[in-house]
């Protein structure tokens, strides 16, 4: 019989209720101390608006989360919204403690596993921002605990409670929950006899089904929100209800994704897993994987493995996105449930090692110290990446943009990174209430100019007509050919913006911060890194456009220095090439080649594949213009490798070269590959 770790002198602490309270308390303190106090990216702005103002989240709607969070808002602040996730996450750690005790019959293993999970990178990251993943973890832990209680006791009350909890879990994040339920299959197999016996009863089926359906009732709220202020695709009608829940509005793939991308994601996922708990915990965690098959019941050990694999490698099989930091950031929270298995394996490995040391006579004080050292090492490893209490990057962007607008301005937005942060400040905090926000795609805000399902071309026509007829100052985050002014962070229209380029001092200061963050690689959040990259592109277009048209004579010394620093970056070089090529500005070929070569040296995995494809298109055009056809074909071909899409103009450029050289074989291959492309 295995000897259990004991902690003499801490008898009161050995009480499971005390340990559970400590787990929840420490977790909550950790999350509150590190959570952002200002708006962030991902879906934070959307959920902040919905939870404060009411509305419908993007498919599948996450109605359990939105119904709960809307009743938990204490004040119109970011902190109030983030606290919702922190509370759910702390409770999830507390329930995991109970789960591990049922698995291992060891209080100390449960204590270590729960705190390790609280300090793990992905779980911690989702516990400090308003998101659905903390609640997803909590609901899964509740279902796991109920299933283990049912298997142990054979009491149907736990089964019926599980049916209700499962329905509620599906009402929050059904894809993650259903995939994670793969871990329940080995547990259900262990209870197959008692379930088979109970299944003979009509009462059993009736109660089970009714309770599961009761758990699904939060979805009714999607239909009762007939005129929501905030809704990702407007009000949900009965005809589109099932499609909304099924996420049919989304395509789970993106142009440019190929099998090589999937292989890269599989490789990327390995270090994501191994270092969730840091370097020091890694060998202990791997030991725990081995010991789990020695110490636990076989179905329990297999269950842990299935839970890990379900929303990591199994989910990755359905994830068809280009391998770039934006989509790495999208995938990163998905394994939040799977990584609970890592914490359990770590705890099993550590406690087994402590038991060995106890038999060797290691004093209790040293054993306690080892537990604390390992837990602190996990927190210390992840703390620099997750300490976001002073994270004001996105908030500063949104405030700077809104504060710069003239009175009673109209601002058109596009994309989550603008709609969420700017919408929250304007709609929830009431910052610049005189400014009216519209969304280009007419998706989120209730003041839509078109129907949600209108074709893209129709939406653009309506927006352009609205801008042309507006009697108020109009601006947009995105540029169009109708824009009359480029402000760097947005574009101006109509008579209120009569200067082609406007350099706003507050924007210039913000650009300096962006350049420092980008050059120093100071950001660890993948969404923020992409956000900064995109903003530098916007500023670079402004500077490049101005200099190509007016030169540098009117720029101050500070602006010239800023121009140089912008053009030292890859996005700065890309925007400069774009401006030169699109405007047809006469430029020395040696300068163009030098600029392209310098940009090529900076091309790395941080650059989105679409931008890399555009760069290779530009590089190919430069080579073709200087009669370097072989090099041009190489560049155009690389562009197509990165973006094998009919919108890629490299197709036409290659066709021109093949036709010129009567290269019928390659021309035929290209036409066969892109039959709908018209050049």
Image: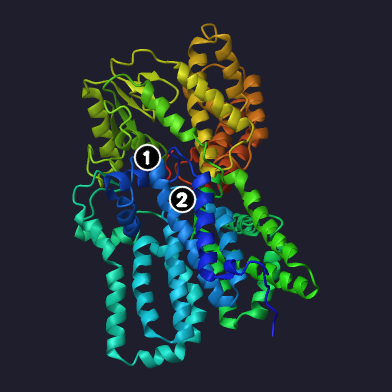
Q: Count residues near mark 2 (Cα–Cα under 10 Å), then give few for <14, some for 14-19, many for 20+.
A: few
- Pointer 1 residue: 77
Element type where label 2 sits in the image: loop
Q: Nearer the viewer, mark 1 or mark 2?
A: 1
Residue 379 position, x and y percent, is: 62, 52
Residue 655 position, x and y percent, is: 52, 40
Task: Say left or right for 22 vs 294.
Answer: left
Q: Quadrant of residue 68?
A: bottom left
Report the front residue among 31 and 302. 31
568 above or below 386? Answer: above
Quadrant for the N terminus, please: bottom right
572 above or below 241? Answer: above
Residue 223 position, x and y percent, is: 21, 57
Task: Say left or right for 298 vs 450.
Answer: right
Report the front residue among 39 and 333. 39
412 above or below 190? Answer: above
């Amino acid at each position: 019989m295995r000897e259990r770790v004991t902690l003499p002198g801490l008898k009161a602490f050995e009480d499971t209720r005390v340990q559970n309270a400590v787990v929840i308390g420490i977790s909550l303190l950790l999350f509150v101390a590190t959570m952002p106090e200002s708006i962030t990216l991902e879906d934070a702005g959307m959920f902040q608006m919905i939870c404060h103002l009411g509305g419908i989240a993007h498919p599948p709607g996450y109605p359990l989360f939105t119904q709960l969070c809307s009743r938990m808002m204490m004040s119109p602040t970011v902190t109030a919204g983030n606290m919702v996730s922190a509370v759910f996450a702390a409770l999830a750690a507390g329930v995991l403690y109970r789960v591990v005790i049922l698995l291992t019959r060891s209080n100390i293993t449960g204590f270590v596993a729960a705190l390790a999970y609280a300090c793990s990178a992905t779980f911690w990251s989702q516990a400090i921002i308003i998101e659905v993943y903390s609640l997803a973890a909590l609901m899964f832990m509740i279902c796991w605990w109920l299933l283990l209680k049912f298997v142990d006791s054979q009491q149907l009350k736990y089964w019926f409670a599980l049916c209700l909890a499962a329905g509620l879990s599906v009402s929050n994040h059904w894809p993650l929950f259903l995939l994670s339920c793969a871990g329940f299959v080995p547990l259900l197999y262990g209870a197959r006899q008692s379930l088979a016996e109970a299944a003979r009863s009509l009462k059993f089926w009736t109660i089970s089904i009714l309770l599961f359906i009761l758990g699904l009732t939060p979805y009714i709220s999607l239909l009762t929100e007939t005129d929501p202020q905030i809704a990702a695709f407007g009000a949900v009608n009965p005809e589109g209800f099932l499609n909304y829940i099924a996420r049919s509005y989304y395509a789970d793939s993106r142009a440019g994704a190929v099998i090589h991308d999937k292989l890269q994601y599989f490789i990327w996922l390995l270090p994501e897993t191994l270092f969730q708990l840091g370097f020091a915990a890694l060998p202990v965690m791997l030991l725990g994987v081995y010991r789990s098959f020695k110490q636990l019941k076989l179905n329990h050990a297999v269950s842990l493995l299935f839970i890990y694999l379900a929303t990591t490698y199994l989910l990755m099989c359905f994830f068809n996105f280009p391998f770039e930091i934006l989509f790495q950031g999208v995938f990163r929270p998905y394994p939040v449930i799977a990584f609970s298995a890592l914490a359990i394996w770590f705890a099993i490995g550590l406690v087994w090692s402590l038991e060995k040391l106890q038999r060797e006579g290691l004093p209790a004080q040293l054993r306690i110290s080892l537990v604390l050292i390992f837990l602190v090492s996990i927190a210390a490893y992840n703390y620099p990446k997750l300490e976001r209490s002073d994270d004001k990057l996105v908030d500063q962007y949104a405030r700077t943009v809104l504060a710069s607008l003239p009175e009673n301005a109209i601002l058109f937005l596009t994309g989550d990174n603008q709609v969420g942060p700017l919408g929250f400040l304007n709609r929830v905090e009431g910052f610049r209430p005189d400014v009216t926000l519209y969304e280009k795609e007419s998706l989120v805000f209730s003041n839509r100019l078109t129907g949600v399902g209108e074709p893209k071309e129709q939406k653009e026509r309506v927006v352009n007509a609205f801008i042309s007829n507006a009697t108020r100052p109009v601006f947009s985050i995105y540029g169009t050919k109708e824009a009359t002014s480029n402000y760097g962070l947005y574009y101006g229209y109509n008579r209120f913006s009569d200067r082609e380029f406007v350099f706003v001092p507050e924007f210039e200061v913000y650009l300096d911060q962006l350049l420092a963050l980008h050059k120093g690689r100071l950001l660890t959040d993948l969404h923020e890194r992409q956000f900064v990259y995109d903003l530098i592109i916007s500023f670079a277009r402004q500077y490049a456009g101005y200099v190509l048209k007016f030169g540098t004579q009117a720029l101050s010394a500070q602006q010239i220095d800023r121009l140089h620093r912008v053009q030292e970056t890859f996005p700065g070089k890309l925007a400069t090439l774009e401006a030169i090529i699109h405007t047809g500005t006469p430029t020395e070929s040696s300068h163009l080649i030098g600029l392209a070569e310098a940009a090529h040296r900076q091309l790395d995995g941080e650059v989105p594949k679409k931008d890399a494809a555009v760069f290779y298109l530009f590089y190919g055009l430069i080579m073709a213009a200087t009669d370097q056809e072989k090099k041009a074909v190489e560049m155009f071909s690389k562009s197509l490798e990165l973006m094998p899409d009919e919108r890629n103009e490299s197709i036409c450029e290659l066709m021109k070269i093949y036709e010129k050289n009567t290269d019928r074989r390659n021309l035929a291959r290209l036409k066969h590959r892109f039959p709908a492309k018209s050049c």
